Image (spheres, helix red, strand yellow):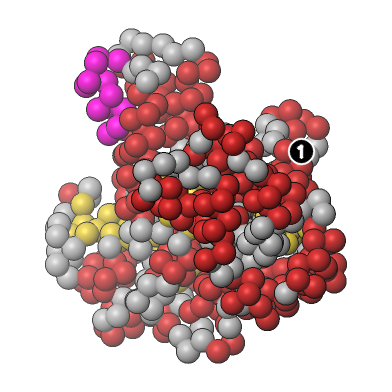
Amino acid sequence: MSFSEEFELLLRARYPIVYIPTREEERVEAAIAHSARQQGNRSVYIWDFVDGYQGNPNDAGFGKRNPLQALELVEKLPSSVAAVFVLRDFHRFLDDIAVARKLKNLARLLKSQPKNIVLVSSQLSIPDDLSEVLTILEFPLPSTVEIKTELKQLLLSINQTLEGRVLDEFVSSCQGLSLDRIRRVLGRAIAAHGSLQPDDVEMILEEKRQTIRQTQILDFYPTAERISDIGGLDNLKDWLLRRGGAFSERARQYGLPHPRGLLLVGIQGTGKSLTAKAIAHHWHLPLLRLDVGRLFAGLVGESESRTRQMIQLAEALAPCILWIDEIDKAFGGLDGRGDSGTTSRVFGTFITWLAEKSSPVFVVATANNIQALPPEMLRRGRFDELFFVGLPTQEERKAIFSVHLSRLRPHNLQSYDFDRLAYETPDFSGAEIEQILVEAMHIGFSQNRDFTTEDVVEAASQIIPLARTAQEQIQFLQEWAASGKARMASRQGSLSSRIQHQSL
């Protein structure tokens, strides 16, 4: 159901007070006015704290700097008059006892009158005592249809046309931006050289990155990593490669649903984060990194508001990859949190969205401590698959050395003994292998020569891998995965788990 359809339904059903959290004030007011006309041409009264009521000459300036007086106009109009009262930034006054009481009284009164109060605010902040009288209605960011209409109108005004493919690229790059930001960045592009050029897509993407940074929730993450940069993990890579075209229109016509996501559980430093970046690069999709800790703001109700904002933004940018690193640290130990239930509410909103989302947002979540994750997170339907990423086997360590040395010493690759390097580094993770090579480079550099296989072996002897310092935790993870509770990311995963367990 679209915003207009849902809002008009609330008007017909006489919902007294509707709360619309959005930063697009101008656009939502235009949508409200359109819906009011559709519902018997209702009058629309718009109020803000500085100018009072606007638009109607008889009431111009009424309620200026007086939110309580602004509510009194609702009662002053005859009970038979159908009207919508739009109150801007009214969330700032909801903690006032007089305003809260007045809203409760009006909620009773308006059940029998064709009047509705609409609170439009840039953030969602509702006191507990008003939660029963307010109805929250989400206002989505511009759809592809709206963006394309805006672009065509702009092109018409400057007597320019764009071919279909280029126009689609502009529409796709504008997804996730407010209509006002879209107009500004397109205006900037036209001001630069008098028309829209294909290269202006990069300017729009930079505006998008800026917008995402301003949310302080999501980061627009650049990706250069490839699937081939992942050493080993053959089962996982095969699974990803099979789904490479799953976001295409051909997949929709075939009847395939959008892939939902992936939960990667395993030992630190084994390539889980690298996999998230490689997926985005291989599928040619934007990568959004969610810092779950940023969702938990200090003000009551703001964490839930930020969660909804994150979901709205991710869906507006779809198709995209949403990367949630170390999700176990954010939602671990829910029962013991002393935060008045904020974490539980955020978690509930998040997993409900995971289960019910229909938008092409592919969620890649990583976790190191499976014991900390709530059971609801592991239930089928939240993610397409749960993979266990364990310590690399000897053959996988050889592949990891090959990936790193191909990048570090492509001209001298044949001088390294990969079989020996893989044999001499049992229980080392991919991240630890990378650190070994850095240490070996320091050895060679300090002696004014290139580093050798012997230097790498010496560096390995000086580093104690996590598999030995966190032996019990890793043993638990391997036994958990070997019991069949997760799919092995490595083709030899089941066997390697037993081997590594014995080596510990």
The C terminus appears in which quarter of the rendering? bottom right
The residue at the point 36 percent across, 11 percent down is: 160
The question of residue 191 being in magenta is answered with yes
* Residue linked to disc 1: 242
- Closer-to-camera residue (216/373): 373
Q: Amino acid at mark 1?
A: Arg
Q: Is residue 200 above or below residue 277?
A: above
Residue 245 seen in the figure: yes
The residue at the point 52 percent across, 59 percent down is: 459
Task: Classify residue 287 as left or right of residue 348.
Answer: left
Residue 140 seen in the figure: no
**Which quadrant holds residue 65?**
bottom left
**Which quadrant holds residue 374?**
bottom right
Task: Classify residue 215 as left or right of residue 438.
Answer: left
- Closer-to-camera residue (468/372): 468
Q: Which residues are magenta?
A: 183-195
Identify the main secondary structure in magenta.
helix
Spot occupied by residue 88 in the image (x, y as percentages of width and height): 28, 59
Number of numbered discs overlaid on the protein picture: 1
Dot 1 crowding, Cα within 10 Å, few <14, some 14–19, many 20+: few
Q: Is residue 431 above or below residue 346?
A: above
The question of residue 406 being in magenta is answered with no
Spot occupied by residue 494 in the image (x, y as percentages of width and height): 84, 61
Spot occupied by residue 174 in the image (x, y as percentages of width and height): 42, 34
Spot occupied by residue 152 in the image (x, y as percentages of width and height): 42, 21
- Closer-to-camera residue (167/491): 491
Task: Classify residue 166 as left or right of residue 9.
Answer: left
